[in-house]
Amino acid sequence: MKTRRTFVKNAVAGVGGLSLPALLHAKAYNNITKKKIVCIGGHPDDPESGCGGTLAKLANAGNDVTIVYLTTGDAGIEGKSLTEAAVIRKQEAINACKILKAKPVFAGQIDGDTVFNNDWLKKMQQLLAGEKPDIVFTHWPIDSHKDHQVASMLTIQVWMRTGRPFALYFFEVSAGIQTMLFHPTDYVDITDTQEQKRKALYCHISQQPDRIYADVHTAMEDFRGKESGVKAGEAFVRMNGKKAGEIFTPVAG
């Protein structure tokens, strides 16, 4: 009979490399060294609201966490110029990252005017190559916000073009309003980091945190928690795929 310790060890070394559940469980048994985690979001507050509890949980366990903001939220404050809003929202993101124990990186695209092209594919590939992540989180690609879609597609393309070098997970934001047709493959219990996530989100004062968190994400955390049998949860979809060069062969029926 396999013990939990044996299962975790096999999961870490199994097909497809490191998985999020294996990393979270293995930490308790000191079976693996710390890993590099990267989260790529469209704007300041997206990574925090989508998977802030999970990022905090991973950082608290000793892993290195980097949050990449595709834009600085330049168009996100009514009555402020793009430059003024960018200064405010960048500082809010920096403050949030301190609470989550994460390193902030600002990729430099413009809020509301993001682009998906070869130049930006190269930039994102270089950025991720420098970070050398084991696990990457990004937006679910079926999302009502164009910037979320661009962040997701840039990440997916880098993952595909570089031979699937990291485990790729998608998070949800404002389920049913922005994120659509999201059917989770993995859940994370964020009961112990829910308050840490809330404090990080409330750093984004310009974005009315009572609205983006209290009115939306607490309900999501409660619902995903009920689905997975815990008090508060976050849900993810794992990107599956064979390594570069392998061929998908249809099964004869």
Image: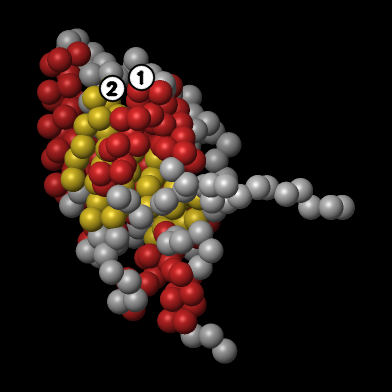
Badge 1 local density, few (<14 within 10 Å), some, or many (20+)?
A: some
Is residue 222 in sight in this rendering?
no
How far is mark 2 from mark 1, CA to CA? 6 Å
Q: Is residue 61 above or below residue 53?
A: below
* Total tally of numbered discs in the picture: 2
- Helix, strand or loop at label 1? It is loop
Q: Is residue 126 left or right of residue 180?
A: left
Q: Is residue 65 above or below residue 216?
A: below
Outermost residue, right side: 253
Q: Are marks 2 and 1 in contact (CB under 8 Å)?
A: yes
- Helix, strand or loop at label 2? It is strand
Report the residue marked by disc 2: 109
Residue that appears at 14% across and 38% down: 94
Query: Which comes sooner in the sequence, label 2 or label 1?
Result: 2
Q: Quadrant of the N terminus?
A: bottom right
Residue 150 point in image, percent of width and height: 42, 26
Is residue 90 in sight in this rendering?
yes
Residue 31 point in image, percent of width and height: 34, 76
Q: Amino acid at mark 1?
A: Thr
Q: Is residue 58 left or right of residue 105?
A: right
Q: Is residue 114 above or below residue 104?
A: above
In this view, the residue in front, 109 or 227, is 109
Q: Amino acid at mark 2?
A: Gln
Report the residue marked by disc 1: 114
Outermost residue, front side: 245
Residue that appears at 47% across and 47% down: 163
Residue that appears at 17% across and 10% down: 81
In this view, the residue in front, 65 or 130, is 130
Badge 2 local density, few (<14 within 10 Å), some, or many (20+)?
A: some
